[in-house]
Image (cartoon, rainbow, N blue to C red):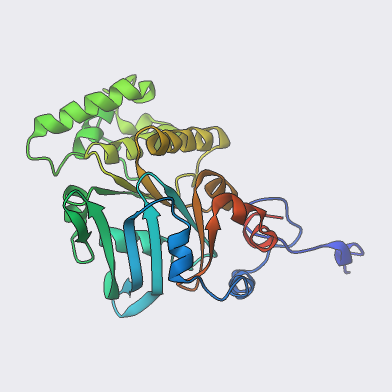
Amino acid sequence: MADPKSKDKKSIGYHQGDVNTVISVDDVNRQAQELGSGVSLDQIAGMIKGEPFLKIENLRAGYGKMEILHEFSLQISKGESLCLIGPNGAGKSTVLHSIFGFTKIFSGGISIQNDSGIQNITELTPNQKLKEAGIAYILQDNSVFPGMTVEENLWMGGYLKEKPEEAKEAAEEIFDKYDRLANRRDQPARILSGGERRLLEISRALVMKPQVLLVDEPSIGLEPRFIEMVFEILHELQHVEGKTIIMVEQNAKKGLEFADIGYVLVAGELALAGKGDELLENPEVGRLFLGG
């Protein structure tokens, strides 16, 4: 028998908020494609505060013969943050993978501004991206080495350093900064809480002293109190240490609250972009991605 109150039910968003009926992924994709007709290069350039520090131009990329990103472009200034949101399968993590060298690039380019000028990093390997371009990737999956101590995990973050002593010095700087890790330096990483593991993953990436942090789903699997801790750490890294942060975040509300700029990806293309707080106020973005 049908629920007599069913006529009052409505479909709103996914991932966040109270819902009566959840929109299917296909419906989210279809409705998200109606958000806008794309974003021009002039609009992308106009959102950043200064000169572009990292730039993606007309990128076509994917895995094997499968193209996931279609003519995708991005710009971000030094010390800014950008959050990618969108339905499942939109290509958000593929953007991070492409920047770091995990995908096949069919056309287009990726560049970064360094001390000697603009460097084309499109074809660099992940190791080269980290060592030469200062780009670090923080995985969404649990990537700590559970049988190693917290200290040994940090040392592993410096595997590209020419001298092991440099990694140990960087680890000491991190222990000075984060008491949570210092108090567990000699303990195996498997005993850490979810929030402490995420802190260790972020800190391990900092051992190489990167300029750009690619952060994939920082809140995934964490309790609310640990989510707040992780975003506070990322806020400090951006606003105190001047790190440039490009993030994929399934908690769209949290990601847009954090980021200076927000991009909405749909089917491998940039459908909508704006300041983070502007997208939070967009009723269609709210309905599809923010749970209301």
Q: In which quarter of the image is the N terminus?
A: bottom right
Q: Position of residue 208 (x, y in %)?
A: 21, 40
Q: Which residue is drawn at 19% across and 48% down?
A: 115
Q: Nearer the viewer, residue 159 or 145?
A: 159
> How many numbered discs, if any?
0
Q: Where is residue 20 in the image (x, y as percent from the top left)?
A: 76, 58
Judge from the rendering whether residue 117 lies leftward or rightward of residue 60; answer left or right: left
Up/down of 57 relative to 132, above or below = below
Q: Which of 46 and 67 is in front in this view?
A: 46
Judge from the rendering whether residue 170 lies leftward or rightward of residue 142; answer left or right: left
Q: Which residue is drawn at 35% across and 38% down?
A: 242
Residue 62 in which image quadrant: bottom left
Q: Nearer the viewer, residue 286 or 7?
A: 286
Residue 44 in which image quadrant: bottom left
Residue 15 visible (yes or no)? no
Q: Position of residue 150 (x, y in %)?
A: 28, 29
